[in-house]
Image (spheres, rainbow, N blue to C red):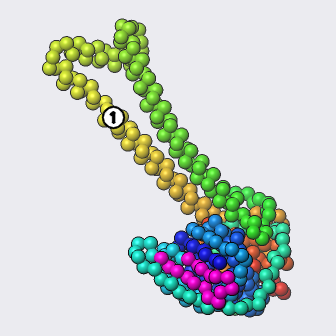
Amino acid sequence: MLEAKLAEASVLKKLLDAIKELVTDANFECSEEGITLQAMDNSHVALVAVKLVQNGFKKYRCDRPMPLGVNVGSLTKVLKCAKDDDVCTLRAADEADVLNLVYEAKNSDRISSYDLKLMDIDAETLGIPKTSYEARIVLSSAEFTRIVRDLSLLGDSVRIEVSKEGVRFASDGEAANGNVLLKGQGPIGKVERGPQGDDSDEDEDGEGVKKEKKNGGEEEDEEANGEEDEEGEKKKKTKVKKEKTDDGDVEMDEDDDDGEEEKEDEEDEEEEDGDGKKRKKKSKSSPKPAKKAKTAASSSKSKKGKSKADDGDEDENEAVIIQMNSHVSLTFSLKYLVNFSKSSNLVKRVELYMSNDVPLLVSYDFGQGYIRYYLAPKIGDD
């Protein structure tokens, strides 16, 4: 028995839209760990690996491992019947011949149910060998999409070269040539490791962002605490001043304290007179709006701090990170890279892993799992 509930159907829709042109029929392998898919295109040049982890589902139950053979085009049509924010539930009984999809609308009582016929697909799961990559590039997925689409207008292939200068995308066409050079932010580092099997760099990257966000939050908290400390010190000073007025040692203190203590003495004397004292007491409350103005200014500072933090996040999404152990230069088909770039709507960052004479790895890691593409390089092209 399989029951997998996604909080939003848009995740599954985007995944299917990204692979439907590469894969015709495929098995969704369901297990206790989640749902995986692995398939190659008809020419055996590209391989796609998808995983939706168990924790990414709102509810997940899989009693035993089972394959769900589906036609990707048919499943895409059924998913188009769901809205992006619908709760999507996949259900399949043991040895069932249909996959049941239920869409529940969040803002209404609408519940839709569809049955997709399953297929018997004889496909072996390929073992992806562990590879030590010589270069790793992290960049904006929107930027990657723009580069491969622009260069695909000029030629059929692109040469990706990673050097100390940066990463260069170059395409030579019959009528025109073009290249794009991306320089990394900061010094070029060394490649530690690439994603192997179920292991990925998602956790490391995710923790890094969280830490930065946490650091940003702590800075704001420190500012707020600093303001609170200043106000606390002011309160302490006023208490000390009052104590000094009670002791009668007012004249021995600093000039600023003398002025405020004299005002307090004047107010104490006015309290004995009658009506005029109340009015002057009200005038004593005049400094209070200044305190409010300070708090308003501090809140505006905190807002400015937040906007700066948001700008930092935007800069992070645009920053290019390059790690390289040695010079790498490979040529790939732009047609496949354009198909890979359709996954850019899943996540803002994309990772490229390269080594000479080794397939290119294009990895999109998102909250519910990942989608990875492997593309064989062209041989004989300069």
- Compared to 24, does 200 lie above or below? above
Q: Position of residue 70 (x, y in %)?
A: 65, 88
Between 212 and 200, which is closer to the camera in this rendering? 200
Q: Position of residue 310 (x, y in %)?
A: 52, 57
Residue 206 occupies quadrant: bottom right
Between 100 and 252, which is closer to the camera in this rendering? 100
Q: Determine if residue 288 is in view.
A: yes
Query: Residue at image x 41%, y 26%?
Result: 235
Indicate whether residue 101 is drawn in magenta: yes
Q: What type is the residue that disc 1 sits on? A: Ala
Query: Residue at image x 75%, y 75%?
Result: 361
Query: Residue at image x 44%, y 23%?
Result: 236
- Compared to 151, does 59 lie above or below? above
Check the image and name the residue furthest to the left: 275
The crowding category of the residue bearing disc 1, from other C-alpha atoms within 10 Å (few below 14, some 14 to 19, many at least 20), is few
Q: Position of residue 327 (x, y in %)?
A: 82, 69
Residue 260 occupies quadrant: top left
Q: Secondary structure at mark 1?
A: helix
**Which residues lie in the magenta part?**
89-104
Q: Determine if residue 178 is in view.
A: no
Q: Quadrant of the C terminus?
A: bottom right
Indicate whether residue 114 is drawn in magenta: no
Between 142 and 15, which is closer to the camera in this rendering? 15
- Look at the magenta stretch and give its main secondary structure: strand
Query: Residue at image x 39%, y 12%?
Result: 244
Between 66 and 222, which is closer to the camera in this rendering? 66
Residue holding disc 1: 290
Q: Position of residue 354 (x, y in %)?
A: 78, 72
Residue 167 lies left or right of residue 142; in this view the side is right
Residue 147 lies left or right of residue 307; in this view the side is right
- Compared to 337, does 32 lie above or below? above
